[in-house]
Image: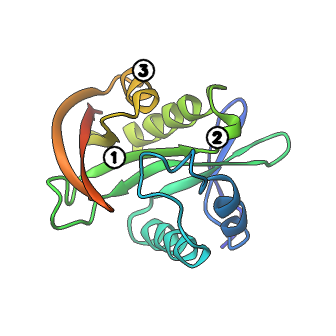
Amino acid sequence: MTRSTILTTRRLRVRNWLPADVEAFHEHCNSEEVMKYLDGPSTKREIRREVAWYQQHQTRHGHTFWVVERKWDRAFLGFCGIIRVSERQSPLDGKLEIGWRIRADKWRRGYAFEAATAVIDWAEWELPSSILYARIHQRNVPSQGLARKLGMRRARVIEAQQLPREVSLWVFRLRL
């Protein structure tokens, strides 16, 4: 897979995953701090499977959670994009989910908002009249704030299994 760019913004490049991204993703987006509201850090093997899944999703659907990198130095910042949820037990199964994960040392610089805004703009052309959903942990106030800033509205609460316990996730939605 080439370093194909999907979107660009003033500061960012949103692109397809490369095999070399596994290392950066594992190092920068897999810390306790970043994974606090997710299932916790993953092994490198799990990260490889996750990246492979994103690549397969891109091939099948034409979109995925893409790599976000800074333009000027190509620094790996995280991911942002859209996937089609494929979890039979989820009320969002088959629906489009927007997601983002930015490395902790680059938080509060507007990167997630800039990337997500570009992804939504892309989706308005490529997935017109769709509804985007975001599942956000009930205590993840910064991501809830970002969802609201993007124009998303809280739609419902769902229960999800995040080992070792069940947690409440707030579901936000945005009609394109």
Q: Residue furthest front?
A: 164
For the point 40% across and 40% down, the residue is 125
Give the residue at mark 3: 149
Q: Reply above or below: 53 against 64.
A: below
**Left or right of residue 15: residue 94:** left
Examine the rendering and report whether any part of residue 130 can be seen: no
Residue 76: horizontal and vertical position, in percent?
72, 51
Q: Reply above or below: 49 against 155.
A: below
Tag 2 or tag 3, which sits nearer the N-term? 2
**Left or right of residue 72: residue 165:** left
Q: CA distance from mark 1 to mark 2?
A: 30 Å
Q: CA distance from mark 1 to mark 3?
A: 21 Å
Q: Nearer the viewer, mark 1 or mark 2?
A: 2
Q: Secondary structure at mark 2?
A: helix
Specify few, some or many for label 3: CA neighbours under 10 Å numbering under 14, 14-19, or 20 or more: few
Give the residue at mark 2: 104
For the point 18% across and 49% down, the residue is 159
Nearer to me, 10 or 145: 145
Quadrant of image for the N terminus: bottom right
Q: Which amino acid lies under the numbered mark 1 shown in the image of this protein?
A: Leu
Tag 2 or tag 1, which sits nearer the N-term? 2
Q: Secondary structure at mark 1?
A: loop
Nearer to me, 68 or 123: 68
Quadrant of image for the C terminus: top left
Location of residue 22 (image quadrant): bottom right
Q: Are marks 1 and 3 in contact (CB under 8 Å)?
A: no
Residue 163: horizontal and vertical position, in percent?
33, 62
Q: Which amino acid lies under the numbered mark 3 shown in the image of this protein?
A: Lys
Specify few, some or many for label 2: CA neighbours under 10 Å numbering under 14, 14-19, or 20 or more: some
Location of residue 132 (image quadrant): top left
Tag 3 or tag 1, which sits nearer the N-term? 1
Give the residue at mark 1: 127
